[in-house]
Image (cartoon, rainbow, N blue to C red):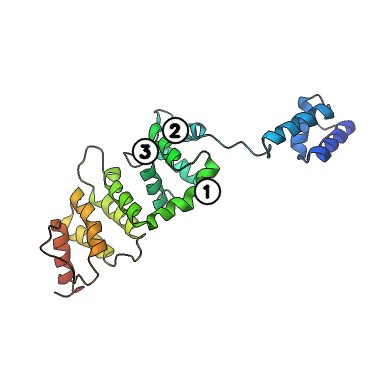
Amino acid sequence: MAKLSRRQEEKVQEFMNITGAPKKGAITHLKKFQWNVESATKEYLDQLQSNPNPHQPKPMSVEELYRRYKDPYQDMIMAEGISRLCTDLEVDPQDIVMLVISWHMKAVTMCEFSKQEFFDGLKSLKIDSLGNFRSRIPSVRSELKNKDKFKEVYNFTFDWAKEKGQKSLQLETAIGMWQLLFAEMNPKWPYVDQWCEFLEERHKMSIPKDTWSQLLDFVRNVDSSLSNFDAERAWPYLVDEFVDYLKEKGLVQN
């Protein structure tokens, strides 16, 4: 930047005294009006009235947010864009809050947001800027404490996380999702680790939807001693086998 003359320095100081603007902003405005303090000051104060903090960038609109994260080769947000979004939101990509956001967006596929999903999701969350988005994270996370919403998020996860064209959920993915979801339950299900070990030892196959759905009913309604477990109920066969597994391991009484 060229050094200012003494007269220009005086005008910069005068402008700063009137407007409270930082030196860089003062110079920019004065140059725009050929160092006419009166004209530069008037324009600056008019701007200040419409935008109380002219030195802060204006918040990005939903359309601008979408363009920020959109894949360069297709009209949707892919894994890389979601990673940038997480950075901007100051959350880990593995944070369960991203699953809740995906639920709000009614996303069809994990790590993808179509333009319509993104727009509809932000509208339902009443989000219209990045700052607003960031400030909504705690309340979005707290929705998991609501029993009914937790069930909705849980049921949503199966179709969202399974691979395209598949009817079942890959075992490794299912285990990761169960560990993520059940960590949010209060009280925590005491057998989550044993359930995952059982599947890896005895099942080693993908998880059908009925097992995924009914496991939550089992977790919520059968006590830790299994004293109220009804063997006559039509549980998925994996649940019945898991009860036998717990008895074999001596974790519950026969």
Helix, strand or loop at label 1? It is: helix
User: What amino acid does circle 1 point to?
Assistant: Ser
Q: Is 195 situated above or below 44? A: below
In this orientation, does residue 145 appear?
Answer: yes
> CA separation, marks 1 and 2?
22 Å
Identify the residue shown where x is 53% and y is 44%.
132
10 Å neighbourhood of mark 2: few (<14), some, or many (≥20)? many
| Quarter residue 16 falls in | top right
Q: Earlier in the sequence, mark 1 or mark 2?
A: 2
Callout 2: SS: loop
Q: Residue at x 77, y 38 (%)?
A: 23
Density class for disc 3 (Cα within 10 Å; few <14, some 14-19, many ≥20) is many
Please indicate whether residue 18 sits to the left or right of residue 98 in the image.
right
Q: Residue furthest right?
A: 6
Residue at the limit of the structure toward the left, as seen here: 232
Circle 2: residue type:
Lys
Q: Which residue is mark 1?
A: 135
Q: Which quarter of the figure is the C terminus placed in?
A: bottom left
Q: CA distance from mark 3 to mark 2?
A: 10 Å
List the residue tagged with mark 3: 112
Q: Residue at x 55, y 43 (%)?
A: 131
Would you name the residue on which mark 2 appears? Answer: 70
